[in-house]
Image (tube, coloured by chain):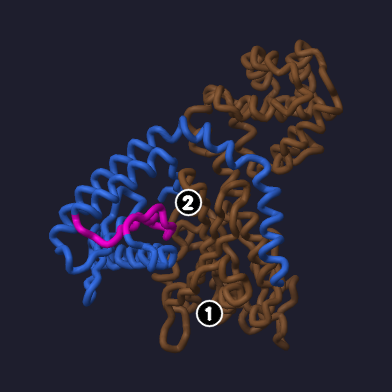
Chain colours: A blue, B brown
Amino acid sequence: MRQEDLVIYEEQIEKIEKALSRLIEDAQAKCVLLVDKDGHLITRQGFTQSLDTTALAALLAGSFASTREIARLVGEPEFSVLFHQGKKDHIHITLVGERTILAVVFDDRTTIGMVRLYAKEATENLGKVFSSANRQDRQTEEEKKTDLDSEFSTSLENRLDDIFSEQS
Amino acid sequence: MASINYAFKEISCKIVFYGPGLSGKTTNLQYVHQKIPPQTRGNLISLATDQDRTLYFDFLPVDIGKIHGFSTKFQLYTVPGQVYYNATRKLVLRGVDGLVFVADSQKSKMDENMESFQNLVENLSEYGYDIDKIPLVFQYNKRDFPDISSLEELGKALNPEGLPYFEAVATKGIGVFDVLKCISKLVLDQAKRRQLFPEREIETEEVEKAPALLSLSQMPQTEQMAEALNSSTPVENLTQEAVTTITQKKPEPPAEEITPKPQDTHKETKPEIELDIGEIAEKEKVKMDQIPSRESPTIISWSAGKSGKKTKSKGFFLWRFVNKLFNR
């Protein structure tokens, strides 16, 4: 299992968001979320204002993790597609690459077939973004990691003091 | 593992509260949820049974705001403590950045604590994680109960390595925020360190090119590296101000003197890396000569600037090395 942090750069996000917007448009979905398998929300597109996307991301990852275990128990390596059907809204979840999960929330304006078709296309595009990004990582990391340099620790300590100390 | 989003300037880390059943993991999260300002936290989500026992996990997102330009978020999870739920307990550990082991201080629960800790080690190793590499703090909970183990007994049984621990009464909030503060700092320090010194880079490309970098980076803690190179200034505190202070103390040494000096000083302290530093110093000599204005804090941009993509890591060590030189 990989033990590296998931690092997303600006140029990746632009491509990812473009792919997600296109998916919403083509599949007529309400919103889409791209979530790390560990439960961190990477990005979202569409009507997400009324949703608690942080919690949704954690639960989606949890749901996916438990489904994967179920798959393993029945002898499948992984269920790559997961579908929750509701009365009005439905969620279609697919695995993107090794580390991320794409969740599409949609209603009866569209059909599961449309969502499945375009989600598959988006998954392939996103997979390419992540794999090409991995190759670029080494160069860009050098430039970007200076952002997390030395002053970070000092600021962190002050901030933690502010938030947590007064409560205890 | 942590998610670092440079596009949105966001860091998100996962902290898991582990421990035996009924030791107070969920209570910790409930207390945090109750006490911190609503704008700082999200909703507390509990996937629990009808009897309020955790079935899968509790989840509480905490946003501690911007730190050095990065919006920093923690995702606090608990695991189900009951032995029966090991399958779901293991899933929660996926991608963990920091662990809080909540132990039940009651004497009768000592075996359960040890069993749970052993289970933690096993579950982590199934993911290929090494417990020694993940920040871990202990919370000895229920200190208000009558028949409790002493801190020595708990330490001996669970924490022989002497990692940070806190006494707590989670129902009253005692020791809850202390633990959270400690683990948050450890987790972010580690995430930062991984970004500054990514292991894979060292393992692959840099091995042949920079043996000095390898031998230094293999030391487990950045602080230790700082001690080795710069006894008076821990690396965590190497802020721009520190550099300015150092440079003000020793203004304008002739640039030519810098190159031979590192070799000399390192012969005394770190003989095994002296040659490599020398080589790097040789390669970097031109760049060194470009720092005549050491009264201004330009060393930062020199060491961490975009200009030297490949040489930056080497330059970074050399820069600390120069600091040490000036401190003498």
Labels 1 and 2 touching (C-beta < 8 A): no
Q: Quadrant of residue B315?
A: top right
Query: Of the residues shown, which amino acid type is indicated by label 1?
Result: Gly
Q: Residue at x 55, y 53 (%)?
A: B71
**In magenta stretch: residue A38:** yes
Q: Kindly indicate the quadrant of the structure image that contains residue A108.
A: bottom left
At a point 47% along the width and 33% down the height, the residue shown is: A140
Find the magenta span and give its range: A27-46
Q: Please state the chain letter of the residue tagged with numbered disc 2 in the rendered image.
A: B
The image shows residue A44, relative to residue A84, as above or below, that is above
The residue to which callout 1 is attached is B21
Q: Is residue B287 magenta?
A: no
* Percent position of residue B134, x then y: 57, 55
**Magenta highlight: main SS:** strand
Decide which of B70, B77 is in the foreground and name it.
B70
Whether residue B304 is situated above or below residue B171 in the rendered picture: above
Whether residue B79 is visible here, answered yes or no, is: no
The chain holding disc 1 is B
SS class, disc 1: loop
Q: Is residue B73 left or right of residue A157?
A: left
Residue B167 at x, y percent in the picture: 72, 73
For disc 2, the neighbor class at 10 Å (few under 14, some 14 to 19, many from 20) is: many
B254 up-or-down from B12: above or below: above
Residue A70: x, y in percent? 28, 68
Earlier in the chain: of badge 1 and badge 2, it is 2
Q: Amino acid at mark 2?
A: Ser
Between A152 and B217, the one lying in front of the other is: A152
- Could you classify mark 1 by the number of other residues whose Cα lies within 10 Å: few (under 14), some (14-19), or many (20 or more)? many
Q: Which mark is residue B3?
A: 2
**Viewport quadrant of the C terminus of chain B:** top right
B132 or A48: which is nearer to us?
A48
Left or right, A28 with respect to B208, comes to left
